Image (tube, grey):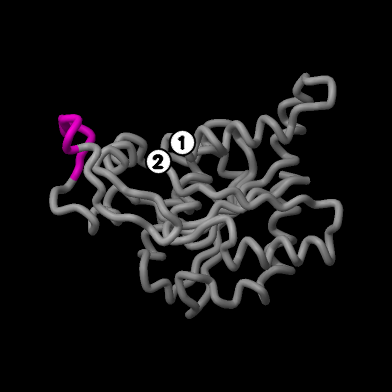
């Protein structure tokens, strides 16, 4: 099985949770490969990179893809915060299993803090305004109005494969509205676990790893 850890906004390939996951699997699940791609690029490029990575992981040695259902079950996405948004988009498109940690479900709204002008899918942005850098993340993604426009055009409106989606939320998330995320995923039939207290970063993630691996195994079997 392959696990792809998808980091959040101000993170990168060396995110704490991703590295803890990889170390845990090396010790307890040596047959599981953990990949930690750096996704500090435009949203369109993130989706393209993830889809290409999943395809490459599931290509057989002779260059032909294995049975589609089998290959998708063998690759699981673990998305944190903004990574949860991207994980849901990818799962909606191809049906792969995903585990979401305090996922962002409305980045087109929450990332408006970097812009003075709200962006809607009806906005007509000219070339000069779309390329202006609004904010550069700790990982090096230079956010532009074009990125916010892409997020507005690709809002999460459904969960197409709810039996392949599990969500872990912390009530104490200080950055995102956990109630909003809970209502969205539950209303679409996904499995949601809400934990008392905690924070956005899932600071106790190391202690959660045995449960996380159990959830992942259940997702693969679903």
For mark 1, what is the residue?
45
Going 59% across and 61% down the picture, which residue do you hit? Answer: 14
190 is higher (above) or lower (below) than 70: below
Residue 122 drawn in magenta: yes
Q: Where on the picture, by quarter, is residue 135?
A: bottom left
Q: Secondary structure at mark 2?
A: loop
Could you tell me residue 119's position as x and y percent? 20, 43
Q: What's the magenta region? A: 119-129
Residue 42 — which label? Answer: 2
Could you tell me residue 183's position as x and y percent? 41, 56
Going 33% across and 41% down the picture, which residue do you hit? Answer: 151
Q: Secondary structure at mark 1?
A: helix
Dot 1 and dot 2 residues touching (CB under 8 Å): yes
Q: Quadrant of the C terminus?
A: top right
169 is higher (above) or lower (below) than 105: below
Q: Is residue 39 left or right of residue 207?
A: left
Q: Give the crowd class for mark 2: few <14, some 14-19, many >=20 residues within 10 Å.
A: some
Q: Give the crowd class for mark 1: few <14, some 14-19, many >=20 residues within 10 Å.
A: few
Depth check: 72 or 124 in front? 124
66 is higher (above) or lower (below) than 222: above
Q: Where on the picture, by quarter, is residue 60?
A: top right
Going 57% across and 38% down the picture, which residue do you hit? Answer: 50
Residue 185 drawn in magenta: no
Magenta stretch: dominant secondary structure: loop
């Amino acid at each position: 099985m392959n696990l792809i850890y998808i980091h959040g906004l101000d993170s990168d390939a060396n995110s704490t949770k991703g590295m803890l996951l990889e170390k845990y699997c090396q010790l307890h699940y040596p047959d599981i490969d953990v990949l930690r791609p750096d996704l500090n690029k435009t949203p369109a490029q993130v989706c393209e990179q993830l889809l290409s990575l999943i395809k490459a992981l599931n290509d057989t040695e002779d260059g032909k893809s294995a049975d589609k259902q089998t290959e998708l079950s063998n690759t699981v996405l673990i998305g944190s915060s903004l990574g949860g948004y991207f994980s849901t988009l990818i799962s909606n498109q191809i049906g792969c299993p995903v585990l979401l940690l305090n996922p962002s479900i409305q980045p087109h709204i929450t990332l408006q803090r970097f812009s003075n002008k709200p962006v809607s899918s009806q906005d007509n942005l000219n070339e000069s305004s779309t390329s202006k850098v609004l904010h550069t993340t700790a990982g090096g993604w230079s956010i532009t109005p074009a990125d916010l426009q892409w997020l507005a055009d690709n809002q999460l409106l459904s969960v197409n494969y709810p039996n392949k989606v599990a969500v872990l939320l912390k009530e104490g998330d200080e950055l995102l509205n956990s109630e909003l995320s809970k209502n969205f995923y539950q209303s679409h039939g996904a499995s949601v676990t809400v934990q008392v207290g905690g924070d956005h970063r899932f600071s106790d993630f190391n202690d959660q790893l045995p449960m996380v691996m159990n959830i992942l195994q259940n997702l693969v079997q679903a």
